[in-house]
Image (cartoon, rainbow, N blue to C red):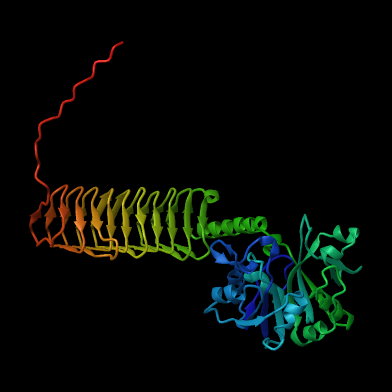
Amino acid sequence: MTISCHSKGQINYCYGVELELDISAVILAAGKGVRMRSSLPKVAHRVAGRAMIAHLVKTVRDAGIDQIIVVVGHGREYVEEILAGENVTFVVQEEQLGTGHALMQARDAARGKSLLVLAGDTPLLRPQTLAGLMVMHEHSKAQATVLTTRVKDPKGYGRVLRGTQGEFERIVEEKDASLPEKAIDEINSGIYCFDRELVFKALSGIGTRNAQGEYYLTEALELIRAGNNKVEICLSEVEEEIYGVNDRIQLAQVEGIMRRRINQELMLQGVAIVDPVSTFIDADVKIEPDTVILPFTIIEGRCSIGSFCEIGPATRISNSTVGDRVTIESSRINQAWIGNSCTIGPFAYLRPETVLHDNVKVGDFVEIKKSVIDDGSKVPHLSYVGDAQIGKGVNVGAGTITCNYDGVNKYPTILEDGVFIGSNTNLIAPIRVGKNASTGAGSSISRDIPADVLAVERAATKFLAKRTSKKKHVDS
């Protein structure tokens, strides 16, 4: 693996150094996360639409590491499902006996000369930070390097104790720290680089003499140092990157930071986000330049949106593809495919398996489900279209309903090119309306209509004598 570091600040001093590194990554993801109050493992909780563990795997991969080992335990089936297809190696920590014990489970799986060790609940970590840590570890010829940062409120984190020359001495956990030690503002990120053979040798000598009664990985740092080996400190200036998630409050805080990052990156790429504070865009969303996102819009899951679109306000799009020059106003789009130059809304609902070709108009209070609408067709307002195939240049009048469900089965409606459906028409499926045919307003069509005709299916109008009622006399 070759990595090149160009970061600024104290994270490293490699100045564009390029190094060949033989390194494996181990992500510790076995914890239950009791404070999350959830049946899910902590790392399965989502940040900006992506599970925390998936964020970490992508970050490690983007940093250039090919071999990734994930230590799983509580709820491991969820974690394995999330990472299916990611080409990672799973090892199991049957009992959660601490971070040192967790890393020991990866002993047989790890192949690299060096190990990068990370906590699975730090989704804000960036690839360049890991690259800087790895380059510093290699460049300094250290046997262990710990990533640290300084924070205003270090409560809950392990404190980094330095010697008189600023060198690493040890890390003390919050529950084991004295009052003077708790006042230290430099904290352990839980991210390390190790010489692989040396760290596993050290782990075999650690104990559980601490407030938690667990095998602390930090104790291995002390044992490595005690053996006249070099332990380096890599001080990061970016505090937010090492924020861990232990409860729902911290999850929301991390979510806010991640969404701010996403919006800022999109704006730097040419997307106009009118009010980033009220706009929520997931990590797996792609948006092309010159598109405008209006306030109170949510774009989630795996979405792709083209250029010169206007999305919002108050629009929610999930797992959908949107072409160029599309306008979507105050609408709900779910698992749909939308072509170029379409106009949707306000208050439209596109349900799964809806396909709109180019220049389609879907107007206000229209619901479309599992239907294909071809070029230039219109469903302007107050209609339901389900299980339908609509050709080119079709106009569906207001209040039209495709009656596709008989209580047991769903049936198709086919409208060929050039069809004109009059307002308030019921199309009772299965039914086919031929090319350039029309229906009269207020019709209930239950038979196929041939091409180039006008079909009217109404009950006869009857005129009945108006009933009059005698008023009762009431005494005052």
Residue 162 lies in quadrant: bottom right
Q: Quadrant of the C terminus?
A: top left
The reply to whether residue 138 is visible in this rendering is no
The reply to whether residue 30 is visible in this rendering is yes
Residue 368 lies in quadrant: bottom left
Q: Quadrant of the N terminus?
A: bottom right
288 relative to 464, above or below: below
Q: Is residue 64 left or right of residue 429?
A: right
Q: Residue at x 55, y 73 (%)?
A: 82
Q: Is residue 463 left or right of residue 380?
A: left
* Residue furthest to the right: 164
Q: Is residue 127 left or right of residue 170?
A: left
Q: Residue at x 38, y 55 (%)?
A: 309
Residue 215 percent across, percent down from the top left? 80, 76
Residue 197 percent across, percent down from the top left? 77, 88
378 relative to 116, above or below: above
* Count of all numbered marks drawn on residues in the image: 0
Q: Residue at x 70, y 64 (%)?
A: 34
Residue 192 percent across, percent down from the top left? 74, 75
Q: Is residue 385 left or right of residue 166?
A: left
Residue 115 lies in quadrant: bottom right
Residue 26 percent across, percent down from the top left? 68, 79
